[in-house]
Image (tube, rainbow, N blue to C red):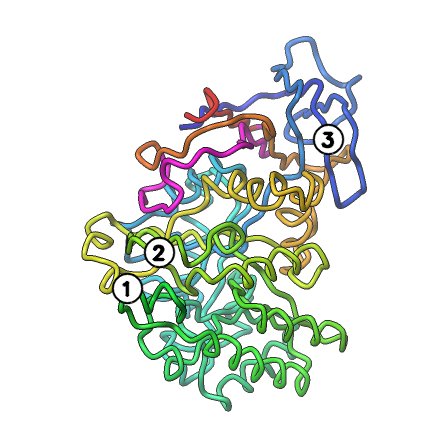
Amino acid sequence: MTHSAEHAAIVIRGARIIDPSIGRDEVADVAIVDGVIAGAARVSARAHVVSADGWILCPGLIDIHVHLREPGQTHKETIKTGTAAACAGGFTFVACMPNTAPPLDHPDAVRLVLELSRNAGHCTVGPIATITQGRAGREVVDFAALLQAGAIAFSDDGDGVEDDKVMRTAFEQAATHDTLLIQHCEYKEISAGGVMHAGSVARRLGFPGLDPRSEEAMIERDIDLCRKTGGRYHVAHISTAKAIDLVRTAKADDLPVSAEVCAHHLLLTDEACADANPNTKMHPPLRPNNDVDACRSALLDGTIDCIVTDHAPHTREEKSVGFLKAPPGIVGLETSVGVCAEAMIRSGLADWSALIKWMTDGPARVIRRQPVTTDVDVPAELTLIDPTATWTVDAERFVSKGRCSPFDGMNLTGLPVGTVRGRRLYMRPAAGS
Protein backbone atom coordinates (compact mmCIF):
# COMPACT_ATOMS: atom_id res chain seq x y z
CA MET A 1 0.00 0.00 0.00
CA THR A 2 1.27 3.48 -0.80
CA HIS A 3 1.80 6.16 1.85
CA SER A 4 0.61 9.65 0.99
CA ALA A 5 0.97 13.14 2.40
CA GLU A 6 0.60 16.72 1.26
CA HIS A 7 3.63 18.98 1.11
CA ALA A 8 3.90 22.68 0.35
CA ALA A 9 7.21 22.01 -1.39
CA ILE A 10 8.68 18.81 -2.83
CA VAL A 11 12.08 18.30 -4.42
CA ILE A 12 12.81 15.16 -6.43
CA ARG A 13 16.57 14.83 -6.75
CA GLY A 14 18.65 13.05 -9.34
CA ALA A 15 15.91 11.35 -11.38
CA ARG A 16 16.16 10.58 -15.05
CA ILE A 17 13.39 12.76 -16.46
CA ILE A 18 11.69 11.22 -19.49
CA ASP A 19 8.99 13.42 -21.01
CA PRO A 20 7.95 12.33 -24.52
CA SER A 21 5.55 15.25 -24.98
CA ILE A 22 8.46 17.74 -25.02
CA GLY A 23 11.31 15.42 -26.03
CA ARG A 24 13.05 15.65 -22.66
CA ASP A 25 15.45 12.95 -21.43
CA GLU A 26 17.97 14.09 -18.85
CA VAL A 27 19.06 13.63 -15.26
CA ALA A 28 17.95 16.61 -13.19
CA ASP A 29 16.14 17.78 -10.07
CA VAL A 30 12.46 18.73 -10.15
CA ALA A 31 10.82 21.04 -7.62
CA ILE A 32 7.11 21.34 -6.88
CA VAL A 33 5.82 24.34 -4.95
CA ASP A 34 2.16 24.52 -3.93
CA GLY A 35 1.36 21.77 -6.41
CA VAL A 36 3.04 23.43 -9.40
CA ILE A 37 6.38 22.51 -10.98
CA ALA A 38 8.77 25.34 -10.17
CA GLY A 39 12.34 26.46 -10.56
CA ALA A 40 14.67 25.23 -7.83
CA ALA A 41 15.35 28.79 -6.67
CA ARG A 42 11.79 29.05 -5.35
CA VAL A 43 12.12 26.04 -3.01
CA SER A 44 12.56 26.62 0.69
CA ALA A 45 14.93 24.68 2.90
CA ARG A 46 11.93 22.94 4.46
CA ALA A 47 10.94 21.17 1.23
CA HIS A 48 10.27 17.45 1.37
CA VAL A 49 13.13 15.78 -0.51
CA VAL A 50 12.83 12.53 -2.48
CA SER A 51 16.15 10.92 -3.43
CA ALA A 52 15.48 9.46 -6.88
CA ASP A 53 18.93 8.40 -8.06
CA GLY A 54 18.46 5.62 -10.62
CA TRP A 55 14.72 6.23 -10.91
CA ILE A 56 12.71 7.61 -13.80
CA LEU A 57 10.47 10.64 -13.38
CA CYS A 58 7.85 11.06 -16.09
CA PRO A 59 4.45 12.63 -16.68
CA GLY A 60 1.72 10.79 -14.79
CA LEU A 61 0.70 7.53 -16.43
CA ILE A 62 -2.72 7.41 -18.12
CA ASP A 63 -5.03 4.42 -18.56
CA ILE A 64 -8.08 4.99 -20.76
CA HIS A 65 -9.69 1.58 -20.19
CA VAL A 66 -10.50 0.77 -16.56
CA HIS A 67 -13.51 -0.81 -14.86
CA LEU A 68 -14.10 0.79 -11.46
CA ARG A 69 -17.38 -1.19 -11.01
CA GLU A 70 -19.18 1.58 -9.12
CA PRO A 71 -22.11 2.17 -9.06
CA GLY A 72 -23.72 -1.19 -8.40
CA GLN A 73 -20.87 -3.70 -8.29
CA THR A 74 -18.97 -2.58 -5.23
CA HIS A 75 -18.34 -6.18 -4.14
CA LYS A 76 -15.85 -6.29 -7.04
CA GLU A 77 -14.30 -2.81 -6.74
CA THR A 78 -15.16 0.72 -5.70
CA ILE A 79 -14.05 4.02 -7.12
CA LYS A 80 -12.02 4.51 -3.94
CA THR A 81 -10.23 1.13 -4.10
CA GLY A 82 -9.86 1.20 -7.88
CA THR A 83 -8.29 4.64 -7.97
CA ALA A 84 -6.03 3.69 -5.05
CA ALA A 85 -4.90 0.69 -7.11
CA ALA A 86 -4.32 3.02 -10.05
CA CYS A 87 -2.16 5.25 -7.88
CA ALA A 88 -0.18 2.22 -6.67
CA GLY A 89 0.35 1.28 -10.31
CA GLY A 90 1.72 4.72 -11.18
CA PHE A 91 -1.41 6.13 -12.84
CA THR A 92 -2.55 9.70 -12.20
CA PHE A 93 -5.49 9.58 -14.65
CA VAL A 94 -7.86 6.76 -15.57
CA ALA A 95 -10.93 6.66 -17.79
CA CYS A 96 -13.63 4.39 -16.45
CA MET A 97 -15.92 2.23 -18.55
CA PRO A 98 -19.72 2.53 -18.22
CA ASN A 99 -20.80 -1.11 -17.82
CA THR A 100 -21.81 -0.51 -14.22
CA ALA A 101 -25.20 -1.15 -12.63
CA PRO A 102 -26.91 1.07 -13.59
CA PRO A 103 -24.74 1.93 -16.60
CA LEU A 104 -23.44 5.45 -17.19
CA ASP A 105 -26.20 6.41 -19.62
CA HIS A 106 -27.57 9.41 -17.68
CA PRO A 107 -25.90 12.70 -16.67
CA ASP A 108 -26.56 12.00 -12.98
CA ALA A 109 -24.54 8.77 -13.18
CA VAL A 110 -21.62 10.61 -14.77
CA ARG A 111 -21.76 13.30 -12.11
CA LEU A 112 -21.82 10.65 -9.37
CA VAL A 113 -18.61 9.06 -10.69
CA LEU A 114 -16.90 12.44 -10.76
CA GLU A 115 -18.02 13.24 -7.21
CA LEU A 116 -16.90 9.88 -5.82
CA SER A 117 -13.52 10.12 -7.53
CA ARG A 118 -12.95 13.64 -6.22
CA ASN A 119 -13.81 12.46 -2.72
CA ALA A 120 -11.42 9.50 -3.04
CA GLY A 121 -8.62 11.85 -4.03
CA HIS A 122 -6.24 9.25 -5.45
CA CYS A 123 -6.20 10.09 -9.15
CA THR A 124 -8.24 11.93 -11.75
CA VAL A 125 -11.10 9.97 -13.33
CA GLY A 126 -12.65 10.61 -16.73
CA PRO A 127 -16.06 8.90 -17.06
CA ILE A 128 -16.87 7.21 -20.35
CA ALA A 129 -20.63 7.21 -21.01
CA THR A 130 -22.57 4.53 -22.84
CA ILE A 131 -23.30 4.74 -26.56
CA THR A 132 -26.82 3.35 -26.14
CA GLN A 133 -29.46 3.50 -23.44
CA GLY A 134 -28.89 0.72 -20.95
CA ARG A 135 -26.11 -0.61 -23.20
CA ALA A 136 -28.93 -2.44 -24.98
CA GLY A 137 -27.77 -1.46 -28.47
CA ARG A 138 -31.11 -0.04 -29.57
CA GLU A 139 -31.32 3.70 -28.80
CA VAL A 140 -28.46 6.20 -28.81
CA VAL A 141 -27.98 8.27 -25.64
CA ASP A 142 -28.16 12.05 -25.37
CA PHE A 143 -24.56 12.86 -26.28
CA ALA A 144 -24.86 16.58 -25.53
CA ALA A 145 -26.23 16.11 -22.02
CA LEU A 146 -23.65 13.48 -21.11
CA LEU A 147 -20.77 15.58 -22.41
CA GLN A 148 -22.02 18.56 -20.43
CA ALA A 149 -22.11 16.36 -17.30
CA GLY A 150 -18.44 15.47 -17.79
CA ALA A 151 -18.28 12.40 -20.03
CA ILE A 152 -15.08 12.24 -22.06
CA ALA A 153 -16.07 9.56 -24.62
CA PHE A 154 -18.74 6.96 -25.39
CA SER A 155 -18.65 3.15 -25.33
CA ASP A 156 -20.91 0.17 -24.66
CA ASP A 157 -17.82 -1.74 -23.55
CA GLY A 158 -18.55 -5.35 -22.74
CA ASP A 159 -20.77 -5.40 -25.80
CA GLY A 160 -20.33 -4.10 -29.30
CA VAL A 161 -23.09 -2.06 -30.93
CA GLU A 162 -24.24 -4.58 -33.54
CA ASP A 163 -27.12 -2.75 -35.23
CA ASP A 164 -25.75 -0.88 -38.27
CA LYS A 165 -28.36 1.91 -38.14
CA VAL A 166 -27.82 2.53 -34.43
CA MET A 167 -24.08 2.64 -34.86
CA ARG A 168 -24.37 5.01 -37.81
CA THR A 169 -26.47 7.34 -35.65
CA ALA A 170 -23.78 7.13 -32.96
CA PHE A 171 -21.10 8.04 -35.49
CA GLU A 172 -23.16 11.00 -36.68
CA GLN A 173 -23.55 12.19 -33.08
CA ALA A 174 -19.84 11.75 -32.49
CA ALA A 175 -19.09 13.85 -35.56
CA THR A 176 -21.60 16.53 -34.51
CA HIS A 177 -20.13 16.82 -31.02
CA ASP A 178 -16.51 16.12 -32.01
CA THR A 179 -16.26 13.33 -29.45
CA LEU A 180 -14.89 9.81 -29.43
CA LEU A 181 -16.57 6.42 -29.88
CA ILE A 182 -14.75 3.52 -28.20
CA GLN A 183 -15.96 0.19 -29.52
CA HIS A 184 -15.81 -3.25 -27.95
CA CYS A 185 -15.57 -5.05 -31.28
CA GLU A 186 -17.53 -8.28 -31.22
CA TYR A 187 -20.42 -9.75 -33.16
CA LYS A 188 -22.00 -12.21 -30.73
CA GLU A 189 -23.32 -14.41 -33.55
CA ILE A 190 -19.74 -14.98 -34.70
CA SER A 191 -18.14 -15.28 -31.25
CA ALA A 192 -20.93 -17.76 -30.44
CA GLY A 193 -20.20 -18.26 -26.76
CA GLY A 194 -16.50 -18.93 -27.21
CA VAL A 195 -14.48 -18.85 -24.00
CA MET A 196 -10.94 -18.75 -25.39
CA HIS A 197 -9.26 -18.19 -28.74
CA ALA A 198 -10.45 -20.62 -31.40
CA GLY A 199 -7.18 -22.49 -31.83
CA SER A 200 -5.14 -25.48 -30.80
CA VAL A 201 -5.43 -24.87 -27.02
CA ALA A 202 -9.22 -24.70 -27.17
CA ARG A 203 -9.31 -27.87 -29.26
CA ARG A 204 -7.05 -29.74 -26.82
CA LEU A 205 -9.26 -28.74 -23.90
CA GLY A 206 -12.50 -29.31 -25.78
CA PHE A 207 -13.63 -25.74 -25.01
CA PRO A 208 -15.71 -23.60 -27.39
CA GLY A 209 -13.41 -21.30 -29.36
CA LEU A 210 -13.94 -17.58 -29.85
CA ASP A 211 -13.56 -16.79 -33.55
CA PRO A 212 -11.28 -13.76 -34.14
CA ARG A 213 -13.51 -12.82 -37.05
CA SER A 214 -16.06 -11.54 -34.49
CA GLU A 215 -13.62 -8.74 -33.67
CA GLU A 216 -12.40 -8.10 -37.18
CA ALA A 217 -15.82 -7.94 -38.84
CA MET A 218 -17.05 -5.21 -36.51
CA ILE A 219 -13.91 -3.17 -37.06
CA GLU A 220 -14.48 -3.46 -40.82
CA ARG A 221 -18.07 -2.23 -40.44
CA ASP A 222 -17.09 0.60 -38.11
CA ILE A 223 -14.25 1.87 -40.27
CA ASP A 224 -16.71 2.06 -43.17
CA LEU A 225 -19.06 4.14 -40.98
CA CYS A 226 -16.13 6.29 -39.89
CA ARG A 227 -15.29 6.93 -43.53
CA LYS A 228 -18.90 7.94 -44.30
CA THR A 229 -19.52 10.16 -41.26
CA GLY A 230 -16.17 11.50 -40.11
CA GLY A 231 -16.88 10.48 -36.51
CA ARG A 232 -13.82 9.75 -34.36
CA TYR A 233 -13.38 6.01 -33.69
CA HIS A 234 -11.21 4.08 -31.24
CA VAL A 235 -10.78 0.31 -31.19
CA ALA A 236 -10.76 -1.02 -27.64
CA HIS A 237 -8.41 -3.86 -26.65
CA ILE A 238 -7.37 -4.82 -30.19
CA SER A 239 -5.99 -8.36 -30.30
CA THR A 240 -5.55 -9.85 -33.78
CA ALA A 241 -3.15 -9.29 -36.66
CA LYS A 242 -6.03 -8.87 -39.13
CA ALA A 243 -7.71 -6.28 -36.91
CA ILE A 244 -4.44 -4.36 -36.72
CA ASP A 245 -4.10 -4.42 -40.51
CA LEU A 246 -7.58 -2.88 -40.80
CA VAL A 247 -6.58 -0.04 -38.47
CA ARG A 248 -3.27 0.42 -40.25
CA THR A 249 -5.07 0.84 -43.59
CA ALA A 250 -7.60 3.26 -42.09
CA LYS A 251 -4.80 5.40 -40.70
CA ALA A 252 -3.05 5.37 -44.07
CA ASP A 253 -6.30 6.73 -45.50
CA ASP A 254 -6.14 9.54 -42.90
CA LEU A 255 -9.33 8.49 -41.13
CA PRO A 256 -9.83 9.55 -37.46
CA VAL A 257 -9.16 6.03 -36.19
CA SER A 258 -7.06 4.97 -33.19
CA ALA A 259 -6.46 1.78 -31.24
CA GLU A 260 -5.26 0.49 -27.88
CA VAL A 261 -3.70 -2.78 -26.76
CA CYS A 262 -3.88 -4.39 -23.32
CA ALA A 263 -0.71 -5.19 -21.42
CA HIS A 264 -1.70 -8.87 -21.21
CA HIS A 265 -2.09 -9.10 -25.00
CA LEU A 266 1.54 -7.97 -25.31
CA LEU A 267 2.98 -10.68 -23.07
CA LEU A 268 0.75 -13.77 -22.87
CA THR A 269 -0.43 -16.15 -25.57
CA ASP A 270 -3.35 -18.57 -25.50
CA GLU A 271 -0.91 -21.22 -24.24
CA ALA A 272 -1.31 -19.51 -20.85
CA CYS A 273 -4.84 -20.97 -20.84
CA ALA A 274 -3.59 -24.55 -21.24
CA ASP A 275 -4.27 -25.44 -17.58
CA ALA A 276 -7.75 -23.85 -17.75
CA ASN A 277 -6.95 -21.36 -14.99
CA PRO A 278 -9.92 -18.95 -14.88
CA ASN A 279 -7.49 -16.11 -14.20
CA THR A 280 -6.38 -16.41 -17.82
CA LYS A 281 -9.91 -15.96 -19.13
CA MET A 282 -10.41 -12.52 -20.64
CA HIS A 283 -12.30 -10.88 -23.46
CA PRO A 284 -10.99 -10.55 -26.10
CA PRO A 285 -9.13 -13.76 -25.30
CA LEU A 286 -5.41 -14.34 -25.24
CA ARG A 287 -4.28 -14.98 -28.82
CA PRO A 288 -1.51 -17.03 -30.50
CA ASN A 289 2.09 -15.90 -30.98
CA ASN A 290 1.52 -14.32 -34.38
CA ASP A 291 -1.15 -12.00 -32.95
CA VAL A 292 1.04 -11.07 -29.96
CA ASP A 293 3.89 -10.27 -32.36
CA ALA A 294 1.52 -8.17 -34.47
CA CYS A 295 0.42 -6.19 -31.40
CA ARG A 296 4.01 -5.48 -30.45
CA SER A 297 4.95 -4.47 -33.98
CA ALA A 298 1.90 -2.21 -34.25
CA LEU A 299 2.99 -0.29 -31.16
CA LEU A 300 6.42 0.17 -32.65
CA ASP A 301 5.12 1.47 -36.00
CA GLY A 302 2.39 3.68 -34.48
CA THR A 303 -0.64 1.73 -35.68
CA ILE A 304 -1.57 1.15 -32.03
CA ASP A 305 -1.61 4.44 -30.14
CA CYS A 306 -1.43 3.39 -26.52
CA ILE A 307 -1.37 0.65 -23.89
CA VAL A 308 -4.26 0.06 -21.47
CA THR A 309 -4.96 -2.39 -18.66
CA ASP A 310 -8.67 -3.21 -19.15
CA HIS A 311 -8.59 -3.58 -15.35
CA ALA A 312 -11.69 -5.71 -14.75
CA PRO A 313 -11.93 -7.01 -11.17
CA HIS A 314 -14.11 -9.96 -10.18
CA THR A 315 -14.34 -11.69 -6.82
CA ARG A 316 -12.55 -14.95 -6.19
CA GLU A 317 -15.93 -16.63 -5.76
CA GLU A 318 -17.04 -15.45 -9.20
CA LYS A 319 -13.85 -16.76 -10.78
CA SER A 320 -13.81 -20.06 -8.87
CA VAL A 321 -16.58 -21.74 -10.89
CA GLY A 322 -14.21 -23.06 -13.57
CA PHE A 323 -13.04 -21.67 -16.89
CA LEU A 324 -16.25 -22.30 -18.83
CA LYS A 325 -18.51 -20.44 -16.42
CA ALA A 326 -16.16 -17.84 -14.94
CA PRO A 327 -16.62 -14.23 -16.04
CA PRO A 328 -13.87 -12.89 -18.31
CA GLY A 329 -11.59 -10.20 -16.94
CA ILE A 330 -8.50 -9.69 -14.81
CA VAL A 331 -7.01 -6.95 -12.66
CA GLY A 332 -4.12 -5.05 -14.20
CA LEU A 333 -3.48 -1.60 -12.76
CA GLU A 334 -0.78 -2.68 -10.32
CA THR A 335 1.11 -4.96 -12.71
CA SER A 336 0.92 -2.97 -15.94
CA VAL A 337 4.32 -1.25 -15.85
CA GLY A 338 6.21 -4.46 -15.03
CA VAL A 339 4.26 -6.53 -17.57
CA CYS A 340 4.81 -3.98 -20.33
CA ALA A 341 8.48 -3.69 -19.48
CA GLU A 342 8.77 -7.48 -19.75
CA ALA A 343 7.01 -7.53 -23.11
CA MET A 344 8.61 -4.52 -24.77
CA ILE A 345 11.86 -3.59 -22.96
CA ARG A 346 13.32 -6.85 -21.67
CA SER A 347 12.49 -8.38 -25.05
CA GLY A 348 14.79 -5.78 -26.64
CA LEU A 349 12.05 -4.22 -28.77
CA ALA A 350 11.81 -0.82 -27.10
CA ASP A 351 13.22 1.40 -24.36
CA TRP A 352 11.72 3.23 -21.41
CA SER A 353 11.17 6.39 -23.43
CA ALA A 354 8.95 4.52 -25.87
CA LEU A 355 7.04 2.70 -23.15
CA ILE A 356 6.36 5.93 -21.28
CA LYS A 357 5.09 7.54 -24.48
CA TRP A 358 2.61 4.67 -24.97
CA MET A 359 1.37 5.17 -21.40
CA THR A 360 1.27 8.99 -21.30
CA ASP A 361 1.34 11.00 -24.50
CA GLY A 362 -0.34 8.27 -26.58
CA PRO A 363 -3.52 7.86 -24.52
CA ALA A 364 -3.72 11.62 -23.87
CA ARG A 365 -3.84 12.25 -27.61
CA VAL A 366 -6.54 9.60 -28.15
CA ILE A 367 -8.93 11.28 -25.71
CA ARG A 368 -7.65 14.77 -26.53
CA ARG A 369 -6.54 15.42 -23.00
CA GLN A 370 -3.87 18.07 -22.72
CA PRO A 371 -0.66 16.07 -22.19
CA VAL A 372 0.88 16.68 -18.79
CA THR A 373 4.54 17.63 -18.84
CA THR A 374 7.54 18.23 -16.60
CA ASP A 375 7.76 21.89 -17.66
CA VAL A 376 7.79 24.64 -15.05
CA ASP A 377 4.57 26.47 -14.18
CA VAL A 378 2.51 23.33 -14.88
CA PRO A 379 0.41 21.57 -12.19
CA ALA A 380 2.36 18.55 -10.97
CA GLU A 381 1.11 15.24 -12.30
CA LEU A 382 4.12 12.94 -12.20
CA THR A 383 5.10 9.29 -11.83
CA LEU A 384 8.29 7.80 -10.36
CA ILE A 385 9.47 4.41 -11.65
CA ASP A 386 12.35 2.25 -10.49
CA PRO A 387 13.36 0.60 -13.79
CA THR A 388 15.70 -1.92 -12.16
CA ALA A 389 13.51 -3.07 -9.27
CA THR A 390 12.83 -6.80 -9.51
CA TRP A 391 9.71 -7.96 -7.74
CA THR A 392 7.32 -10.86 -7.53
CA VAL A 393 3.63 -10.27 -8.15
CA ASP A 394 1.64 -11.14 -5.04
CA ALA A 395 -2.08 -10.75 -5.68
CA GLU A 396 -2.80 -10.97 -1.96
CA ARG A 397 -1.09 -7.61 -1.53
CA PHE A 398 -2.94 -5.75 -4.27
CA VAL A 399 -4.57 -2.48 -3.29
CA SER A 400 -7.45 -3.35 -5.60
CA LYS A 401 -10.25 -5.52 -4.25
CA GLY A 402 -9.52 -7.82 -7.19
CA ARG A 403 -7.11 -10.72 -6.74
CA CYS A 404 -7.58 -12.53 -10.07
CA SER A 405 -4.37 -12.10 -12.06
CA PRO A 406 -2.60 -14.42 -14.50
CA PHE A 407 0.63 -12.75 -13.37
CA ASP A 408 0.37 -13.84 -9.73
CA GLY A 409 3.76 -15.26 -8.74
CA MET A 410 5.54 -13.91 -11.84
CA ASN A 411 8.88 -12.13 -11.44
CA LEU A 412 8.95 -8.72 -13.11
CA THR A 413 11.43 -5.87 -13.47
CA GLY A 414 10.30 -2.26 -13.34
CA LEU A 415 8.10 -0.90 -10.57
CA PRO A 416 6.20 2.36 -10.02
CA VAL A 417 7.39 3.75 -6.70
CA GLY A 418 5.46 7.00 -6.41
CA THR A 419 3.21 9.63 -7.91
CA VAL A 420 2.78 13.34 -7.41
CA ARG A 421 -0.57 15.08 -7.94
CA GLY A 422 -0.45 18.71 -6.96
CA ARG A 423 0.76 18.91 -3.35
CA ARG A 424 0.13 15.21 -2.67
CA LEU A 425 3.01 12.75 -2.82
CA TYR A 426 2.27 9.00 -2.85
CA MET A 427 5.21 6.71 -2.17
CA ARG A 428 5.45 2.95 -2.14
CA PRO A 429 7.09 2.03 1.18
CA ALA A 430 9.31 -0.73 -0.23
CA ALA A 431 9.98 -2.32 -3.61
CA GLY A 432 7.51 -5.06 -4.40
CA SER A 433 5.34 -4.39 -1.36
Q: Nearer the viewer, residue 419 or 234?
A: 234
Secondary structure under the numbered disc 2 in the rendered image: helix
- The image shows residue 151 at horizontal and vertical percentages of 52, 62
* Mark 2 residue type: Cys
| 250 or 411: nearer the viewer | 411
Spot the residue most to the top: 45
Q: Which mark is residue 205?
A: 1
Figure quadrant of residue 387: top right
Q: Is residue 111 left or right of residue 388?
A: left
Asked whether the residues under the numbered discs 3 and 1 touch, taking CB atoms below 8 Å apart as contact, a structural biologist would say no
Marks 1,2: beta carbons within 8 A: yes
Q: Position of residue 234 (x, y in %)?
A: 59, 68
Q: With respect to residue 376, does 249 lie above or below? A: below
Instruction: Give the mark, 1 or 2, whose residue is nearer the N terminus.
Output: 1
Q: Amino acid at mark 3?
A: Ile
Q: Which residue is mark 2?
A: 273
| Label 3 sits on residue | 17
**Please, what is the three-letter code of the amino acid marked with disc 1?**
Leu
Q: Are marks 2 and 3 in contact (CB under 8 Å)?
A: no
